[in-house]
Image (cartoon, rainbow, N blue to C red):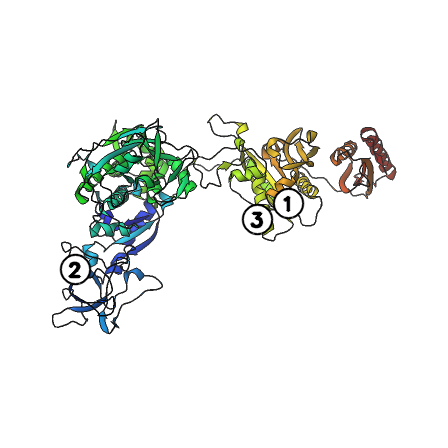
Amino acid sequence: MIIGVNWLKKFAKIGDIKIEDLCEKIGARLVEIESVENLAQKYKDVIVAKVVKCEKIPETHLSLCKIDDGQVRENVERDADGLVQVVCGAPNVRENLLVTWLPPETIVPETFATDDEFQLTSRKLRGEISHGMLASPRELGLWDEHEGILEIDENLAKPGDSFAKICELNDYLLEVENKSLTHRPDCFGIVGFAREVAAICDAEFTPPEYFANKIELENTEKKLTSPTVEIANAELCNRYECVVLANVDGARKSSLLRETYLSRSGMRPISASVDITNYMMLESGQPLHAFDYDKLCQVSPTKKPDILVRAAKSGEKLELLDGKIIELADQDIVVCAGNSRNSVPIALAGAMGGMSTEIDDSTKNILLESATFNLYNLRGTQFRHGIFSEAITRFTKGQPAELCDHVIREASKQFCKFANAKIASDIVDNFAKKVENPEIAVKIFDVNSLLGTKITVGEMEKVLKNLGYKIEFREEKTDAEMFATAPWWRTDVKIREDVIEDIGRVLGFDNIAPTLPARDFAAVEQNAELDLKANIRETLASFGANEVLTYSFISEDLLAKVGQDSRNSYKIVNSISPKLQFVRQQLTPSLLEKVYENWRAGNRDFALFELNQTFRKEKGLTEEKVPVFSDNLAFAIALEDQSAPFYVAKKYAENLAERLHIKFDFREVANNKMPMHENFFEPKRTAEIWLNDTQIGVIGELKNSVSRNLKLPENVAAFEIGLGALLENLPPNGASFYQPISRFAGTSRDLTLHVSMGKAYATVESVIREILTNLPENFAWNLTPVDIFAPNTETKNLTFHLEIADHDKTIDTRFVAEVIDKIAKAVSEKLDAKII
């Protein structure tokens, strides 16, 4: 957003404050200043001149001009009458025309401070010497118009005047960072910004008349049918005002001064009627829209100027002013011609008007709109349809409804003054939902306690009154509560801390003396959840896995690709992108997208993991009516030369469990059926992860359809674990897991069990571990998998490596043999298996 300092000074009496000091104060107390442009330097050599003589140069489109600059420019060649010769190719150059002259040695403003700066000289054109040039709006760097030179009204200036002075271009333009003002709709207008600047600089603020008082309209000629306004849902639009203006002179141009103010704010001047709506929006922050009244009546099903504001119907189409035909969504808001029984959309509310009611050269009567719309719906509209206009930028900040009436009255007055209009109807005002700012009690002690300051009551009161607050004291000021009510334009002030922040901000947070806290220091209690996450991060990173952080918002397309039902996902009303409309149910799908991106980039044999929150509708809401979330760990591995990625992922999970001093139990998926929210895993190559008789996750390889949809390599496996159950089953802090190494020699054995194909590895392992766990305490052992071999489709051989030692003496091989016999007996009885 561009803020002109001269425009600010019309309302904030900040005097001749140095621009550096002003920017420092604004940056510290309101919003970041990204850049400053000095227009005075850009236009310092531009002079108003009069074309005294103008003759065509034969066989060219050029004209030989003699201009009068009041002889203010030194060191330039003149004729006997003191006139300067300039060659001009503009079609509108003529005698007695006031123009802008760029003398020799002037840098053309369009190129000022660019890499292609162009400095004028005196040079020959078609045999005639030209001292500088007569400039068009584009060459002056004002707006994009190059069809002719800029024409200046003779009532505005005289030859020799400084162009910068007559157009108030001795100015600085401040580019501010919009995102810092997202919560401050009042600051998206010059008036609101000036009010803040005045408070910051402790200067007088004088609002425009239409802000201070209700303007009574004059110049009325009520010959046209008055409009009606119906609002279908106050949540979508809480105020809509309109008025009919007749006999508008659509071809009339704005004053040059107004045009330059529009151009320096980044808007091209069009005509007096269009410029009025743009100027009022920039000054007040309230967007306006004008419909062609006669076209509106023509397209309306009622054939009258009836207005209905409603939610769009999914699938409805609307042709916008830019010629683009859009398909509306049910989250869009539309302004319609007609009523609740029969209506036709004529505008995408807050974003852009429709082609059917476009104002053109034939327009004589207009219907002027001033309204507010639901900011959350408009944010969705903005991204859904790719509209990022000045108007919707302001609407998505939450315009105060009270502003509508102030602005439509002033705009109507200006239409009468600058476009020869007549007010042809009453102002129709449908104020569906009035919201008043709350009275907030603030204790004087709390202000200084929270800010760490010694601000007096008088200073607090002054600051808040300068910002427009209504202040009341019901006791003595020394130790009383201050009752503050924010003005109607401050829609962001809701709680005590908002008021205190305003006090500290305006007086300057940088003026608060840094001091050590007065209260005692106390150690922060350890957070078990944070410790667990840190431990997991450190462990998986030490295994070679890479942590990623992905968006919590995903597309409906991704849900479909992994087979998840979007109805179990929360949908974002004001999504930041059409492709990020849903909150994810699990982390794994987002992780798999990153697997694809890394694989496509040429990475091979890598593992990714993420710790984050997930949301599923089936879990319901909390007591505060917000969705219940789960903290999860997701892990995915992609391998180039590995036929069984499941076992690699399983090894990562087992090693993680070992570091956490717990043991995961991997169980078959019951009846090959996966839960709905985990159905991207292939049931036959998937296991449930259990901990203390509670299922905490799933590990497996992906379905072929999911791999195809996401364009993944063949050898990908993943697991996802809920951290809540992990946290509940972790050993207590301080528990010792030290196991001394035996001083005596131990032994090892490889055990190969011949089992049926249907027996799971985990089942076989659990039987062996049950025997080993019951050994006397003086024995230490370790069991690890070695191999799985399937000689046929009915049986397989599972090989384990057993290490065993005795802490009291050298291991007795007879004892080891007895242990092996017990294992053989147990697997035979429980699994119908044998050791080979």
Task: For mark 3, give the secondary structure.
Answer: helix
Compared to residue 517, the image places residue 475 above or below, namely: above
Compared to residue 295, the image places residue 625 above or below, namely: above
Residues at discs 3 and 2 in contact (Cβ within 8 Å): no
Instruction: Give whichever of discs 2 and 1 has the lower sequence position.
Output: 2
Q: Which mark is residue 597?
A: 3
Amino acid tagged 2: Leu
Amino acid tagged 1: Ile
In the displayed orientation, state which residue is furthest to the left: 81
Q: Nearer the viewer, residue 116 or 21?
A: 116
Determine the image quadrant of residue 744. Answer: top right
Determine which residue is flagged by label 1. 637
At which x and y percent is residue 593?
57, 44
Compared to residue 292, the image places residue 36 above or below, namely: below
At which x and y percent is residue 100?
21, 60
Determine which residue is flagged by label 2. 97
Determine the image quadrant of residue 755. Answer: top right
Amino acid tagged 3: Glu
